[in-house]
Image: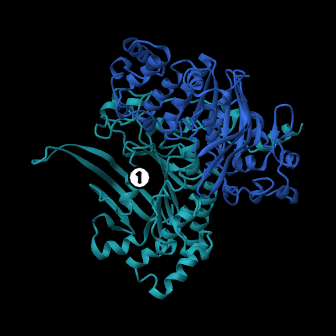
Chain colours: A cyan, B blue
Amino acid sequence: MAEPILQVSGLVKHYPLTQGIVFRKQVGAVKAVDGVDFELGRGETLGIVGESGCGKSTVAKMLVNLERPTAGEIRYKGEDIARLSGKALRAVRRNIQMVFQDPYTSLNPRMTVGDIIGEPYEIHPEVAPKGDRRKKVQELLDVVGLNPEYINRYPHQFSGGQRQRIGIARGLALRPEIIVADEPVSALDVSVQAQVINLLDRLQSEFELSYIFIAHDLSIVRHISDRVGVMYLGRIVETGRDSEIYEHPTHPYTQALLSAVPVPDPEAREHRERIILTGDVPSPTNIPSGCRFRTRCWKAQERCALEVPALAVPAEFRYAAGPAAHDSACHFAEEKQVVPPEEPGRKEQAQEQAEE
Amino acid sequence: MLLEVRDLQVEFRTRDGIAKAVNGVSYSVDAGETLAVLGESGSGKSVTAQAVMGILDIPPGRITGGEILFRDRDLLKLKEDERRKVRGAEMAMIFQDALSSLNPVHSVGDQLGEMFVVHRGMSRKDARARAVELMDRVRIPAARERVKDYPHQFSGGMRQRIMIAMALALEPALVIADEPTTALDVTVQAQVMDLLADLQREYNMGLILITHDLGVVADVADKIAVMYAGRIVESAPVHDIYKAPAHPYTRGLLESIPRLDQKGQELYAIKGLPPNLMNIPPGCAFNPRCPMAQDVCRTDVPPLYEVDEVRRSACHFWRECLHG
């Protein structure tokens, strides 16, 4: 991996649950994020996948300092930004920007596009002196593929995909090094999603950006990520290079998650093995002991209730330098292929069949 | 044929003009068959379904033409009270957002039982017993205890199961599911789609599945109708369409989705945006975004050409699309 630009260790966010009006006492906590570690290399894309409530958005908020961690460190170029305040915090924040999920609610309807994209300069005037801003904003509009003449229009005059481009332009305004994108395409139509993903790809190489890409859509995450972390109930349960996770998953949750994704190929319908999990995700106020996935796991044994599995290369793969040797938090990790392997000739074959 | 929609036209009158939401749509579903209606927002896929169910908001909506034949009766010619007997008992709908489709102030047991009280004239007590049975059917654990619970006490997947139970209560011949799993997580989506497929087989229902998810379609559909700007642009059995699409829009959609089993390079992106329904481009509505467009596409609306006995494509150049 390239030199890490961001190192996260032991990140925890607990929201206290209190009882009583006058004398508030804490009766428990929502353990939204419960010990997360990862590194992000320069110019790299780390994808974080997981289902709703797994804590992936809370991680995003802590990275851009919209939430303060309960414990843990977020090191940006070696400096712990979770404890910064005032001027030092402001300086760091410039370098880590966010793109939000919903392009309809994340843009102020009463501000023009120019004001929205230029607003970051109000807080960081050193990036663009006042007289320069209009020109800068127009450049940004051009970069994200919008007509620079639209600078005086309002958000409602744009489609969903165009609004997301505006959100991306705002994220780029301060020339950040890291962009945290939380479900940036999930609100968009299929044909528009591809445009925005390609834009993010292009911007990454143009501006040497590092991305944290958070999404629930596993196919999109695979497309854009170099490395992937799978989250479940506030923790990363498996992490590795994209091919390691998608082709050689060893954690049962990852296997179930991948097998549940419908593949757009009706031929695969019959010979695909699907792991259907039973039940729902447990409440984050009451996390199961030991392995947090054991209540839904078909492999769970006594040991799983007693010992918390560490996120490390499982013992059975440790000495085999293969794609299965990546971090997986399971006592009984074993490799299982759940995504049908890619057949390079499939498309051409289909074409021939159709022509017959 | 269980349901046959013929040349349906729906428009909406708005302050800014008339929006033609559905422009001559025809499709059919047989008992035990699954038709997937695929399209992006604004393609008219939900409006068509609402017209079939008879739950279109009129005004501003207006059905300006066409027929909806259900068991050989034209539903558009029925009086409202006759229509109401069909709705719920003979055809039912499952909505995307279970939380806002269920009534928050009544227990789920009351809401499920209401179907039997209203349509079958059952006593409240009998209806309650049927509600428990239904909840068992859709595999809700501890149904007997949970029948008194309110919608907010259930998880998203459980609420969607209750919606399904409600739709299936009177064993309708046709079920329309409008994005039934879009709001759910993948592992829960798989559970719910499995359940729906099992129940369909059991009751031999016709199912219309409205979705934008090409993966879900490949998993469950028998045939597909792809909609764009209020028209069907391609219809075909599911296997044919994924092998070789006969319309450039379908082809663009299939190529623009990232795949779980492939690490792609740059994605193919359909350029531009879906059209404004108040101002649909002349000729083929897809022509401004189409890589194959010629002069004729800008002037002549393509009819639904017969590709073979079971396939139709509304593209002047379907041959080129199919083979190129």
Q: Residue furthest front?
A: B79
Q: Residue furthest left?
A: A23
Image mark count: 1
Q: Residue at x 58, y 38 (%)?
A: B56
Q: Is residue B110 visible?
A: yes
Task: Say which amino acid is labelled 1.
Answer: Ser
Nearer-the-camera pick, A312 or A238: A238
Nearer-the-camera pick, B57 or B213: B57
Q: Chain of mark 1?
A: A
Nearer-the-camera pick, A147 or B251: A147
On the picture, is B254 further left or further right than B41? right
Residue A99 to residue B182: above or below: below
Nearer-the-camera pick, B167 or B4: B4
Q: Is residue A129 visible?
A: no
x, y percent for residue A339: 61, 38
Residue A104 to residue B80: above or below: below
On the picture, is B315 further left or further right than A24? right
Q: Residue furthest bottom?
A: A131
Residue A341 to residue A78: above or below: above
x, y percent for residue A27: 18, 41
x, y percent for residue B67: 72, 32
On the picture, is B8 further left or further right than A336? right
Q: Secondary structure at mark 1?
A: helix
Q: Which residue is mark 1?
A: A57
x, y percent for residue A244: 55, 46
Q: Residue at x 43, y 31 (%)?
A: B159
Q: Quadrant of residue B133?
A: top left
Q: Residues within 10 Å of mark 1 (few under 14, many from 20)?
A: many
- Say which quadrant the C terminus of chain A sits in: top right
